[in-house]
Image (cartoon, grey):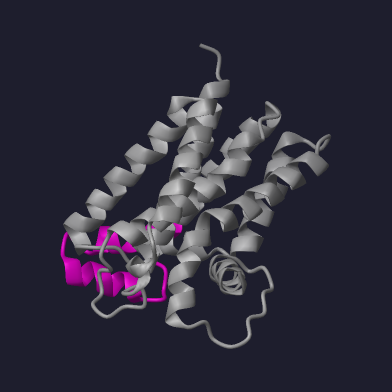
């Protein structure tokens, strides 16, 4: 139990800015086992967003959405937004070449394409949050971070790392049975709400993973972050679509 608790804290420290103190640098086994807890970290984030939305009821929808988005960025530190921006720069500037794309994505500076992707992502997420909160729909806020980090979990466990000898080389050694159980429970919840809540993230995952394999022959930390961001938006959009009148 202590090893699993340490692994959860490792996942929380890696995916968020929640102040977590670990006794020393996590070893390779702890880092690999931490992947099991990515969806649980998402649940902690989603509960925080839904809780803030509940506490801020009565404020104008735009202000309420801005507060939730602010908390979203504050708790994650913009880590996945950075991955989205770097991926956008790499895909545009890479001109279809693997090594050129990887080199651009590794550059810490943001380009015009990355800045545009960042602004559009934040605008889209704020707009979706505003519409969902106007309809008092909190389920998408709770589930979007869970589904996003579940998508990243599956990417890490089913796809090779694009850079040889990278930090993710040992992550696929963890047992898959808990991952299957988590996926089954999440799929059951999403199907219970509406099949679209499951179908849209699945299609997005398949498409983005296919793009990564075609261009990079694997994934990077940046593309995993981009996957999380885009999956969150897909889940929010699915929730909004279900609110719309037929």
Marker count (numbered): 0
At a point 49% along the width and 46% down the height, the residue shown is: 147
At a point 67% along the width and 74% down the height, the residue shown is: 20
Q: Residue 161's quadrant in the figure?
A: bottom left
At a point 41% along the width and 76% down the height, the residue shown is: 108
* Residue 18 or residue 105, whichever sits in front: 18
Q: Position of residue 113 (x, y in %)?
A: 37, 58
Q: Is residue 15 above or below residue 163?
A: above
Residue range of the region highlighted in magenta in the rendering: 89-116
Q: Residue 12's quadrant in the figure?
A: bottom right
Decide if residue 112 is in sight here.
no
* Residue 212 within the magenta-colored segment of the rendering: no
Q: In this view, does 1 lie above or below 246?
A: below
Q: Please identify the residue farthest to the front as the structure is shown.
A: 1
At a point 81% along the width and 36% down the height, the residue shown is: 57
Q: Position of residue 140 (x, y in %)?
A: 59, 37
Which quadrant holds the N terminus? bottom right
* Residue 140 or residue 177, whichever sits in front: 177
Q: Does 212 sit left or right of 88 as displayed?
A: left
* Residue 109 within the magenta-colored segment of the rendering: yes
Q: Where is residue 119 in the image (x, y as percent from the top left)?
A: 50, 52
């Amino acid at each position: 139990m202590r090893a699993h608790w340490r692994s959860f804290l490792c996942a929380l420290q890696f995916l968020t800015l929640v102040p977590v103190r670990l006794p020393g640098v996590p070893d390779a086994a702890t880092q690999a086992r931490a992947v099991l807890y990515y969806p649980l970290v998402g649940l902690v984030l989603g509960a925080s967003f839904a809780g803030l939305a509940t506490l801020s009821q009565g404020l104008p929808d735009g202000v309420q959405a801005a507060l939730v988005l602010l908390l979203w960025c504050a708790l994650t530190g913009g880590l996945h937004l950075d991955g989205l921006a770097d991926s956008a720069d790499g895909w545009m500037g890479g001109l279809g070449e693997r090594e050129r794309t990887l080199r651009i994505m590794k550059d810490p500076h943001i380009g015009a394409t990355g800045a545009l992707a960042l602004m559009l992502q934040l605008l889209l997420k704020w707009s979706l949050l505003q519409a969902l909160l106007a309809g008092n729909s909190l389920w998408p806020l709770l589930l979007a971070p869970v589904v996003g980090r579940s998508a990243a979990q599956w990417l890490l466990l089913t796809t090779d790392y694009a850079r040889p000898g990278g930090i993710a080389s040992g992550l696929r050694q963890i047992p898959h049975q808990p991952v299957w159980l988590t996926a089954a429970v999440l799929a059951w919840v999403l199907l219970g709400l509406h099949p679209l809540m499951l179908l849209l993230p699945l299609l997005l995952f398949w498409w983005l993973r296919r793009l990564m394999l075609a261009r990079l022959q694997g994934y990077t930390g940046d593309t995993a972050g981009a996957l999380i961001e885009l999956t969150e938006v897909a889940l929010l959009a699915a929730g909004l679509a279900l609110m719309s009148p037929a």
